[in-house]
Amino acid sequence: MADPERHPFLQGLSKHRGTPPTVVVIFGASGDLTARKLIPAIYNLGFDNLLPADFHLVGYGRKPIPDEEFRSIASNAIKEYSRRELDAEAWNRVGANTTYVSGAYDEKAGFDRLAAHIGEIERRVGGEVQTLFYISTPPSVFNPIIQNLGASGLGSRHLGKPHHSKVIIEKPFGRDLESARALNAELRSVFDESQVYRIDHYLGKETVQDLLVQRFANSIFEPIWNRNYIDNVQITVAEDQGVGTRAGYYEQSGCLRDMIQNHTTQLLALTAMEPPGSFDAEALRNEKVKVLKAIEPIALGPESDAARAQYVAGMTGGKGVPGYLQESGISPESSTETFAAMRLSVNNWRWNGVPFYIRSGKRLARRVSEIAIQFKRPPGTIFAQKDGFNLAANTLSFQIQPDEGLSMILNAKIPGLDTRTQPVKMSFRYATTFGSNTPEAYERLVLDAMTGDGTLFIRGDEAETSWKLYTPVLEFWQSQGRGGMEAYQAGSWGPAGADRLLAARGHVWRKP
Ligand code: BG6
């Protein structure tokens, strides 16, 4: 955390959010996400005194693990993955109340034991506590967990009160429209929508929230945020890493399911939505759903609005790396895309005729996520091209990560006795202004769920609307097998097909 003494902009931020006494139960307690993200997030919330005084963490999983061992797994995870070093005093406050319950996901008996354990915590606390169930397991056990939360009564604890049970559900939220609908129906059979927090961790990122602040807390943007001034919008979510150790998951998923349907589309929704009437969960999510519904069906086949590709061997970070088909655990005939790009049209009054280009991929030139708003070129009556002036289009870019910030490309005069112009960049960098140790997305999201704020979570109808847009693409690609699958070199910016999507409208991808 940046020191408020040195960073005056941070002064006056209230820490207390009135969180009721809470038990967080993690299903999938020995999984990768728990170690990398969830335990460090909880630790850092504790460090910042943002957890309620009566806070308990309960791991649940198939493997029997004694409490003491689970505590040591947790403290090792903090040592390895937390943004802050392990501070014994801060950890003890959480660690002292950290326990583990073992049980199967498809047997009610385990959930009954969990219910008894939570009842015991309540007796010790001497009052009612809210329970937040974090489902961080593979999707194959989502349904039994939901059913058993219902059957054991855990899902309906303290219903009707603000500290009623809540459930956070990790991605993937379905793998197409039909499975997302089925999962929503399953959730609704046990929970009310107000109890359900579907996570997309991109919404917890500081810069993604800053996008909302920039758009709606500054009066200069709204008048020009439309088709009269904006030429096109480019959203890039690029990773330099390959598939790593997640071959099993990734082969079943691919870039469209893993990144485009959720993270990238969320960035688009926040960029393109109308200003919500207020900053509350329903108002904001209504606007996101409206704009997602306004996106036209994606053209497929000839004149396609979609491109997909797999990386082949290349170089990243000065090192030779294998192609996707040579990665361990990947079928040599795999038709899973590691890159996807789309040209989307938002058919409403604000955006008609403005293409939204989105792309994401693994093993690209570098890890960078940005939203670039390209404005129309000046008319060229003064500083005309024919007179040798080559003006850049003004571009406002939100740098989501890394090097978080905001920049604007303007054209300026090069000092000198003749008139020559050059594009210049005006930048705001988070690290320079606020210090660099900002909270991780999961900290914000776990805290929001504990306090009952669903603003940064995906509503059921929103998940379905997004799947509705992309399911025809998935089905088309599946029907084509490897037909139409392009290749791109690891360490490049992706396949030629992604460039063609833009070239057809006279555009080129901006170099992030
Ligand atoms: C996850 C995807 O949701 O997001 C991963 O499953 C991806 O494949 C990750 O690497 C990217 O998240 P971040 O926060 O590192 O940009």
Image: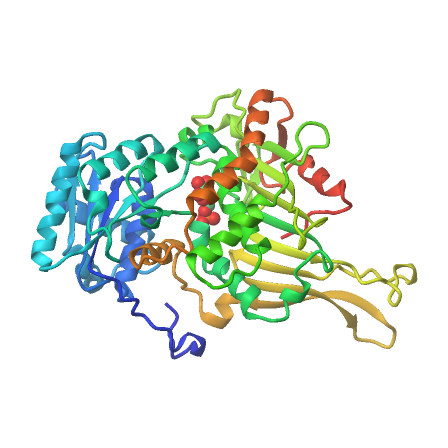
Query: How far from the left and from the top, in percent, is residue 419?
Result: 86, 72
Near-viewer residue (167 or 310): 167
Query: How far from the left and from the top, in percent, is residue 8?
Result: 43, 79
Count of numbered labels shown in the rendering: 0
Quarter holding ligand 1: top left
Q: How is the image coloured?
A: rainbow
Within the image, what quadrant is residue 449 found in?
bottom left
- Residue 379 relative to residue 260: left or right: right
Near-viewer residue (470 or 211): 470
Q: Residue furthest front?
A: 160
Query: How far from the left and from the top, in percent, is residue 507?
Result: 74, 47
Query: How far from the left and from the top, in percent, is residue 392?
Result: 76, 60
Q: Residue at x 42, y 57 (%)?
A: 281
Task: Note whether residue 502 is visible.
Answer: yes
Task: Note whether residue 338 is visible.
Answer: no
Near-viewer residue (236 or 180): 180
- Residue 288 relative to residue 391: left or right: left
Q: Which residue is drawn at 55% across and 42% down?
A: 316
Is 44 situated above or below 185? below
Within the image, what quadrant is residue 477 found in?
top right
Q: Residue furthest right?
A: 386
- Location of the N terminus by quadrant is bottom left
Q: Residue at x 37, y 73 (%)?
A: 13
Q: Which residue is drawn at 43% across and 48% down?
A: 458
Is 372 situated above or below 278? above
